Amino acid sequence: MSFTRRSGTGRPRQTSRPEYRHMVRNTHVQPTASSTAIQAQVAPSLGPPVSSRTIQRHLAERHLGSQRPLRVLPLTPTHRHLRLEWCHARGNWTAAEWNQAVLNDESRINLDSDDNRVRVWRSP
């Protein structure tokens, strides 16, 4: 089921189709650009100012959402197999042998802010 905008209903759009395509093109060229950065890039070509929320709505109509980028690559079947072999090789280790091993957990905890994480425009 799809919904389309009927002509003549509601308030007329503030942006034209070429301006709309320009916004979407900017997200493909610079996926990390925020809606306010896109607003600043598009503003000289537009007559009246367009809010960043309007830009977000236009991008949502194209099924582009602001998401966090991947922090790590997903594990491949080869990686999983190698990890399983590593575990089987060390399955019978004693406590003294494990005391000699250096393992680290690369978790990251930030208590006071969002740490300025980057977001990207991406289709689901």
Image (cartoon, rainbow, N blue to C red):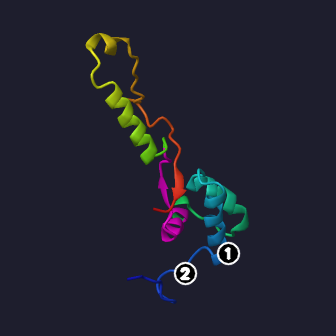
Q: Nearer the viewer, mark 2 or mark 1?
A: 1
Marker disc for residue 18: 1
The answer to whether residue 112 shows anywhere in this view is yes
* Of 18 and 1, the residue lying toward us: 1
Position of 86 relative to 8 (above/below): above
Q: Which residue is mark 2?
A: 12
**Which residue lies at the image location 42% right of the left edge and 28% below the top edge?**
106
Which amino acid, mark 2? Pro
Q: Secondary structure at mark 2?
A: loop
Q: Secondary structure at mark 1?
A: helix
Question: Where residue 61 sits: x, y (%)?
Answer: 49, 71
Report which quarter residue 23 is drawn in: bottom right
Question: Where residue 33 sits: x, y (%)?
Answer: 60, 52
**Which residue lies at the image location 62% right of the left edge and 60% below the top edge?**
28
Residue count near mark 2 (Cα–Cα under 10 Å), binned few <14, some 14–19, many ≥20: few
Q: CA distance from mark 2 to mark 1?
A: 16 Å
Which amino acid, mark 1? Pro
Residue 95 lies within the magenta run: no
* Of 76 and 35, the residue lying toward us: 76
Residue 65 lies within the magenta run: yes
Question: Where residue 18 sits: x, y (%)?
Answer: 67, 75
Range of residues picked out in magenta: 55-70
> Which quarter of the image is occupied by the N terminus?
bottom left
